[in-house]
Image (spheres, grey):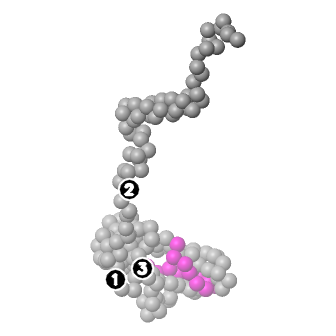
Amino acid sequence: MSSDNPDARKPRMKLWKIVLIVIFSLWALGTIAEMINPSSSVTTTISSPKEPIETYDDSWIPTGFTGYATDDNLAWRWGTKSETNCTYSSGACWSVMVVTKDGCPSGLYGEIAILDKSEVQIDYTNDTTTLVPAGTKVKMTFDTFNEEADTARLSQLTCR
């Protein structure tokens, strides 16, 4: 049985050859695209150097003080009983001792939240200073007339 159809006699290309040609073509296109635009390379992105990690410098902080988390120019501690004079208020008062590494040219702002015996915030109070030179210790005093005041929590320290 011979066929008069000339296409019937041509050998068919095997499927694996077609797949191999497609894979090779895609690889070649990717290589050419990389040569034209090298910044789009995954390899370049992966091998690029990492961003430097910022560290918190606490080497200057005096013993007994704690660095203030949002400003590495400030360190603080609660004032002791002998450092805190409550003659002004009828409720309670607290003091905070602050030291600056580089100073605060326009002063320092401090704020505390006042809590009752159930640790519910019931009030707040604040204090400010004028210019604070580098390395200077500052005492900020926070008074309240709220008779329910029991404890306090430092809310904010801002170098101006």
Task: From this view, report whether residue 3 is shown above or below residue 56.
Answer: above
Q: Amino acid at mark 2?
A: Lys
Instruction: Give the SS element for disc 3.
Output: strand
User: Is residue 143 located in the magenta-colored stretch of the structure?
Assistant: yes
3D distance between C-alphas at marks 3 and 2? 30 Å
Q: Amino acid at mark 3?
A: Thr
Residue at 44% across / 82% down in the picture? 77
Q: Amino acid at mark 1?
A: Pro
Name the spot of residue 38 as percent of width and height, x first: 37, 37
**Earlier sequence position, callout 2 versus callout 1:** 2
Residue 33 in view, yes or no: no
Main secondary structure along the magenta-highlighted residues: strand
Name the spot of residue 40 as percent of width and height, x first: 42, 39
User: Is residue 127 located in the magenta-colored stretch of the structure?
Assistant: no
Q: Which residue position is annotated with label 3?
A: 66
3D distance between C-alphas at marks 1 and 3? 8 Å
Q: Which residue position is annotated with label 2?
A: 50
Residue at 32% across / 73% down in the picture? 101
Name the disc covering residue 148, or none.
none
Task: From this view, report whether residue 6 is shown above or below residue 158.
Answer: above
Q: Residue furthest right?
A: 1
Q: Which residue position is annotated with label 1?
A: 62
3D distance between C-alphas at marks 2 and 1? 33 Å
Instruction: Give the SS element for disc 2.
Output: loop
Residue at 61% across / 14% down in the picture? 9
Instruction: Give the SS element for disc 1.
Output: loop
